[in-house]
Image (tube, rainbow, N blue to C red):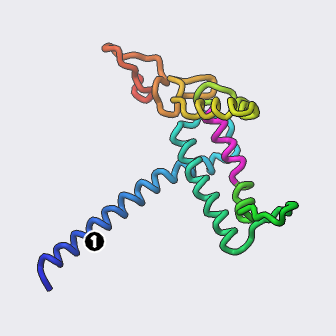
Amino acid sequence: MDKSFIIFFVCKIFILHLFLLIFFTIKTILMNYYLKALRNYGVFTGRARRSEYWYFALFNIIFAIVASFLDRLIGNTFTMNLSTGPMDLGYGYIYVLYAVAVFIPALAVLVRRLHDVGKSGWFFLIILIPLVGIIWLLILLFTDSQYGPNKYGPNPKGIGNTDEIDEIGNYIKPHQAQ
C-alpha cells in the first residue's frame, strides 16, 4: 500500500470525525431550546428569547414533517371524500398525536416570546386579522428583546437587568453588584 494513500485515508477519517463532532455538538445545543420549551410545558409567565422560540419552531416543523412521513410510510393517512373522489390529506394519527402533544408548549413559548417584546400573551390573537395579523405577529417574533426587565420579568439575555453603574459608566451585572 502506498504511504500517501494511508495518510489521505487517515486525514479523511479525521475530517469526517471532526465534522460529526461539530454537527452533533451544534445539534445538541440547538435541540436544547426545543427541550427547554417542552420542559416549560404550560408555563405562560416569563420571557423567551428569539433563539428559544425560533429553534423550537424549527424542530417542531422537522418533527411534524417526520410524523407526517411516518403516517404516509405505514399507510395511515386521513382521506377526505370530495365530489371528485377521495383526497389524501397527507397526515394521520401519528401527526395528530404529535400536534396535540406540542400544542400547549408551542402556545406557551409563543406567549413568553410576546412577553419578551413587551406584549401581552393575548396579542397572539392578532393573527385573526387576515394577512395583516400574521405579518404583524411575525414582525414581533423577529423583534429583539426589550432592553432590561419589563413587567413580564428580567431580560433572558441578562442585558440591562440592573440600574447599577460602576465608576466608569458601565452597567454592573446583578451578580457583580457589591
Q: Which residue corresponds to the image point at 83% horizontal and 65% vertical from the top-left?
A: 85
Left or right of residue 82: residue 63: left
| Picture residue at 57% right of the left edge, 48% below the top | 56
Q: Please state which amino acid type lies under the numbered disc 1.
A: Ile
How many numbered discs, if any? 1
* Main secondary structure along the magenta-highlighted residues: helix
Tell me if residue 108 comes above or below residue 76 in the rendering. Answer: above
> Of 178 and 173, which appears nearest the observer?
173
Residue 103 as seen in the image, left or right of residue 160: right
In this view, which residue lies farthest toward the front? 84
First to last magenta residue range: 102-114
In the displayed image of the protein, which residue is found farthest to the left?
3
Asked whether the viewer can see residue 30, the reply is yes
Q: Which of the two residues, 129 or 41, is positioned nearer the viewer here?
A: 129
- Quadrant location of the C terminus? top left
Q: Residue at x 63, y 32 (%)?
A: 135
